[in-house]
Image (cartoon, grey):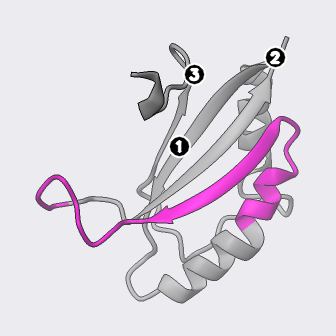
Amino acid sequence: MAEKFIIAVLTNPREGQDAAFTEWYDDRHIPDVLKIPGVISAQRYGLAPVQRMDPPHPFSWFAFYEVETDDLSALIDDMRERGGTERMPISDALDPNRITLVFSPHGPRRTPGDA
């Protein structure tokens, strides 16, 4: 039975490469990731001007991928194999310092009405 996971990716563009980074991420990278079996959605978020914590904030972009799979290792291996190839090229506008983490749900999804 397929399980749900979230893949969270924190990134930045290289200095002066904001436009190229955004074009690549939105027009190429997200569509490429969505072709991977098991990836069911993708959305990118920019750092809001108001934050709960004081700076520094090391990353300005957050990508959120929902996946469903019965073999997480195979899905991650597929992502690794595609990365940097014609199937999923990496832009020179992407700063190489980034964080990618995979999370599994714990407990039910709750809303304010559940309290």
Q: Depth check: 92 or 43 in front?
A: 43
- Residue 87 coordinates in the image, percent (x, y): 86, 58
- Residue 47 coordinates in the image, percent (x, y): 37, 66
Residue pointed to by mark 2? 70
The answer to which of marks 1 and 2 sits earlier in the sequence is: 1
Write the start and end of the magenta stretch as one range: 29-56
Residue pointed to by mark 1? 8
C-alpha distance separating marks 3 and 1? 11 Å
Kindly identify the amino acid type of the residue bearing the numbered disc 2.
Asp
Kindly identify the amino acid type of the residue bearing the numbered disc 1.
Ala
Residue 32 in the magenta stretch? The answer is: yes
The answer to which of marks 3 and 2 sits earlier in the sequence is: 2
- Do residues under tags 3 and 2 come within 8 Å of each other at their CB atoms? no
Secondary structure type for disc 1: strand
Q: Is residue 5 above or below residue 51?
A: above
Q: Depth check: 25 or 97 in front?
A: 25
Residue pointed to by mark 3? 104
Please name the residue shown 80% across and 24% down the image: 69
Secondary structure type for disc 2: loop
Secondary structure type for disc 3: loop
The numbered dot on residue 31 is none
Q: Is residue 93 above or below residue 104?
A: below
* Quarter containing the C terminus: top left
- Residue 31 coordinates in the image, percent (x, y): 80, 62
- Badge 2 crowding class, 10 Å Cα cut-off, few under 14, some 14 to 19, many 20 or more, is few
